[in-house]
Amino acid sequence: MPREFDIIKEYFQPLSTIKSNAQIPLNQGDDCAVVFESQPLVFSIDTQIAEVHFLEDMPADQIAHRGLAAALSDLAAMGVKPSFFTLALTLTGDESPQWLSNYASGLEKLAQQFSCPLVGGDTTQGKTISQTFQVHGYSENGSWVTRSGAKQNHGIYVTGPLGWGAAGLKAFLENGSDDLKQGYGYPMPKIDTGFAIKNKVSAMIDISDGLLADLMHICKASHLDAEIELSRLPLLDSVIKNWGYDSAVSMALSGGDDYQLCFTAEVSDITPELMQAHQIHRIGRMRSKNSQNPRINCLQADGSLFNPGNHGYQHF
Ligand code: ADP
Ligand code: MG
């Protein structure tokens, strides 16, 4: 494996030249990078560790893609476009030049797509691979979306499909099809959608831990109950075909790693054109105020209540 500074120069420095909407007078290569700011800076950090957040033996470009995509997804949830990012990467020392090159190319594709240069980072050696991405973007007109603005009777919406992340992980573990694996290997952060709807939504979150767990964050922050109709969930036919309808619903509700958006809005503000353009589905409504202990009621097609049990992924 190449030495630390050769790795940075060969694989990561090229990503510093990706164009950005930020003014960056000093990029990678010095002790710090420098960025000019004229608008509020919105930023978030995300760590992924081998065998916790990704499979060590999955393709390196997918490891990189997943890491950056998960971090960018938080900006999407705020309605903010990315401007630049940093990466703290721990490698084991067993990675080949081919692995490194694939890793960098996975990063580059996604970073190019969202005009988000890599302005700095840290490269270290440890027992397992770990990648920490800090992503930054500027809020246009000083506005951003939080989890706390939902109002009673606002519609609950998701971008879809849901359950592909969990199904993709299952496909990796059970040697399933490449199409299914894509959901886990190449989740796409909904940056353009988040940006397009930011002035129409009352609350928004990205779905990283499963719909119920993430919608519950909106319920708690907004002090409201929620009601969703299971028949409205955007499920993938291929997931239903492989594991059956009940499993597909359970993956959509409680599986993680989808990186779709869940948001609330006045129903009249989310037009059919907008829904079609961004694969948006209305799945329910915010209900009465319950500041103590919000609930999410899941209605089945016959109107009866469904008890989903497990409420999504938590680290501890
Ligand atoms: P220092 O020891 O002063 O913190 P480093 O030796 O860690 O600096 O890094 C040298 C330069 O290479 C810095 O500009 C740093 O931002 C950059 N760098 C190191 N690792 C990465 C990485 N994984 N991605 C992008 N830039 C990196
Ligand atoms: Mg230094």
Image (cartoon, rainbow, N blue to C red):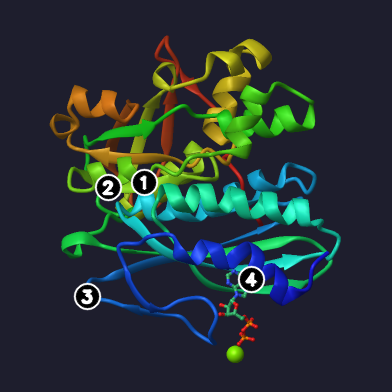
**Tag of residue 9:** 4
Q: CA distance from mark 3 to mark 2?
A: 19 Å
| Amino acid type assigned to the residue bearing label 1 in the image | Ile
| Amino acid type assigned to the residue bearing label 2 in the image | Phe
Q: CA distance from mark 1 to mark 4?
A: 29 Å
* Residue that mark 2 sits on: 195
* Residue that mark 3 sits on: 38
Residue 310 can be seen, yes or no: no
Lower position in the chain sequence, tag 4 or tag 3: 4
**31 relative position to 115: left or right:** right
Element carrying mark 3 = loop
Q: CA distance from mark 2 to mark 1?
A: 6 Å
Numbered disc in front, either 1 or 4 = 4
- Residue 59 lies, in percent from the top left, at 72, 42
Q: Is mark 3 within 8 Å of ligand 1?
A: no
The image quarter in which residue 49 lies: bottom right
- Residue 89 lies, in percent from the top left, at 67, 67
| Amino acid type assigned to the residue bearing label 4 in the image | Lys
Q: Quick check: marks 4 and 2 in contact, CB under 8 Å?
A: no
Q: Quick check: marks 4 and 3 in contact, CB under 8 Å?
A: no
The image quarter in which residue 200 lies: top left
**Tag of residue 211:** none
* Residue that mark 1 sits on: 191
Quarter of the image with the C terminus is: bottom right
The residue at 58%/40% (across/down) is 256
Element carrying mark 4 = helix
The residue at 47%/53% (across/down) is 111
**10 relative position to 197: left or right:** right
Q: Is mark 4 within 8 Å of ligand 1?
A: no
Numbered disc in front, either 4 or 2 = 4
